[in-house]
């Protein structure tokens, strides 16, 4: 079994996070994190069968910029026609189609998560209002 990176690290400079939380905060994909663990290029520890990654704001890799769907360039019909007539380009077209499909699925997922986020924010506001009303009614502060 691999040991974590042998560099000495001050654990007070960071926070040990599970893989998914580290992925969200750092912008690094789960598969990349797992590859870094396997190759000992990231500080980690194993607790109760779960990997924890040392999150340090100062050492985090910068994530690539997010490209919105509206700003993605659309292929021109002329290029698509030429690609379909060139020998051996069938596989390129298939990969391109698969990539476009994946982008559409990701955009749908983003829209769903944005909707859930909005619903959660609304629910939180309702609960905050309820707390204020109850505190005023019973003259109690928690």
Image (cartoon, rainbow, N blue to C red):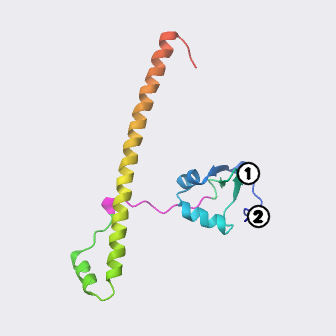
The residue lying at 58 percent from left, 61 percent from top is 61
- CB atoms at circles 2 and 1 under 8 Å apart? no
Report helix, strand or loop for mark 1: helix
When the figure is inspected, residue 35 is found, relative to residue 17, above or below; the finding is below
When the figure is inspected, residue 43 is found, relative to residue 16, above or below; the finding is below
Label 1 crowd (10 A; few <14 / some 14-19 / many >=20): few
Q: Residue 102 occupies which quadrant of the picture?
A: bottom left
Label 2 crowd (10 A; few <14 / some 14-19 / many >=20): few
In the image, is 39 to the left or to the right of 88?
right
Q: Position of residue 97 (x, y in %)?
A: 32, 71
Q: Position of residue 17 (x, y in %)?
A: 63, 50
Residue 67 painted magenta? yes
Determine the main secondary structure of the stretch shown in magenta.
loop
**Which mark lies nearer to you, 2 or 1?**
2
Q: Residue 28 occupies which quadrant of the picture?
A: bottom right
Q: Position of residue 9 (x, y in %)?
A: 75, 57
Q: Tell me which numbered mark, 2 or 1, is placed earlier along the sequence.
A: 2
Observer-nearest of 137 and 51: 51
Observer-nearest of 62 and 98: 98
In the image, is 15 to the left or to the right of 126?
right
Which image quarter holds the N terminus?
bottom right
Observer-nearest of 119 and 46: 46
Looking at the image, the residue that sits furthest to the front is 49
Which image quarter holds the C terminus?
top right
Q: Which residue is mark 2?
A: 6
Q: Position of residue 79 (x, y in %)?
A: 26, 79
In the image, is 137 to the left or to the right of 12?
left
Residues in magenta, as a range? 60-71
The residue lying at 38 percent from left, 53 percent from top is 109
Q: Which residue is mark 1?
A: 11
The residue lying at 33 percent from left, 87 percent from top is 88
Residues at marks 2 and 1, CA–CA distance in whole angstroms: 13 Å
């Amino acid at each position: 079994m691999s040991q974590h990176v042998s560099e000495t690290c001050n654990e007070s400079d960071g926070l040990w996070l599970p893989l998914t939380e580290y992925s969200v905060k750092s912008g690094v994909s789960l598969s990349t994190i797992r590859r870094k663990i396997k190759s000992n290029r990231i500080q980690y520890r194993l607790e109760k069968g779960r990997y924890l990654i040392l999150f340090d704001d100062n050492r985090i890799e910068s994530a690539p910029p997010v490209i919105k769907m509206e700003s993605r360039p659309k292929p021109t019909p002329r290029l698509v026609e030429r690609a379909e007539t060139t020998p051996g380009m069938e596989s390129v077209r298939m990969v391109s189609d698969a990539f476009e499909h994946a982008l559409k699925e990701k955009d749908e997922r983003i829209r769903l998560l944005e909707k859930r986020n909005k619903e959660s924010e609304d629910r939180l506001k309702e609960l905050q209002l309820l707390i204020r009303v109850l505190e005023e009614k019973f003259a109690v502060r928690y």
